[in-house]
Image (spheres, helix red, strand yellow):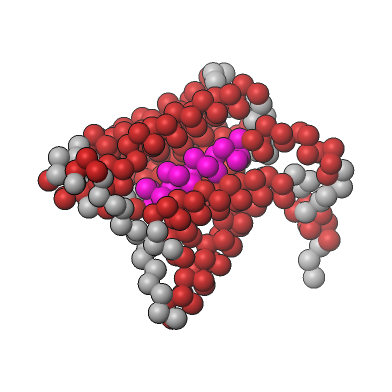
Amino acid sequence: MADPGIWSQVFNFADYGQLLGLVHNSLIAGAVLGVVGGLIGTFVMMRDLPFAVHSISELSFAGASGALLMGANVVLGSLSGSILAALVIGLLGSRARDRNSIIGVLMPFGLGLGVLFLALYKGRAANKFGLLTGQIVAVDTPQLSWLLATSAVVVVGLLVIWRPLAFASTDPELAAGRGVPVAALSTIFMVLLGLTVAMSVQIVGALLVLSVVCTPAAAAMRVTASPLLVTVLSVLFAVGSVVGGILLALGSTIPISPYVTTISFLIYIVCRIVGARRQRRGWQVIPRPRAPLPAAVR
């Protein structure tokens, strides 16, 4: 029989109202992260880049831990590592085989470098652990400002390139033949993805970024083939996972990431069951929705 003390560590709602004020910034950051992660996650799944997300998160972790060791701004360190990894993958991984090789090299290197920096860091253990698994009260006002500014850049960037990027993600050969700058779009998208991953590391930690950037979009694609509905559901699922995870973790002594990943996983399971039932009834659910042909290349 499970120790009751374990459950009190996992779920504890004593003084919940007073504790809620401590995570005001985290709730705002989590909601914003859910919107950005849900938007960009749709393209991550269309372009088959989940492992690129994990690779970028490892370099983001290395940059953040290096900044922590040197007493520099952790957010800037995380952003630097993410953008560096995104540029390397975007510029050198134009073909799938090259991209997979680069990701396989970057992932262990980034993780090993981050572990080295944390081993040399002599400060609070909570700071070390938080970079890997997230911290519920880690977002102060300056960090929130950075997150909001970064989110604005990502959202505006996605809106500007949305239609040609959707076309290039669905059929890159045809898009290139119609004059769409596929290589340039890929590099821009990877930079935007790097910024999103750096944001995610601040909330859920480096090890579990996939639950925010990939799982919601993957769940949405199980229940609809409409590009618009996939995007809307992906955003809703991501926001629900992050904000719900923060609210559940508020009274516990457990890091936020297990709650976020569990909610995200349960959403995916439900969507997969719904998608399977629709298929049995004759509905056609396509994992990767085909985007409409942009007007500029018709």
Q: Does residue 10 belong to the magenta stretch?
A: no
Number of marks present in the image shown:
0
Residue 100: image location, x then y, percent: 28, 49
Name the residue rendered at 83%, 44% in the picture: 16
Q: Which residues are magenta?
A: 29-45
Residue 37: image location, x then y, percent: 49, 43
Q: Left or right of 133: which side holds 181?
A: left
- Out of 160 and 14, give the one closest to the viewer: 160
- Out of 74 and 111, give the one closest to the viewer: 74
Furthest residue to the bottom?
281
Q: Does residue 44 belong to the magenta stretch?
A: yes
Q: Which quarter of the picture shows residue 23?
A: top right
Relative to residue 64, is residue 278 depicted above or below? below
Relative to residue 53, is residue 267 depicted above or below? below
Name the residue rendered at 34%, 41% in the picture: 162
Furthest residue to the right?
15
Position of the N terminus, as image quadrant, is bottom right
Relative to residue 141, is residue 42 depicted above or below? below
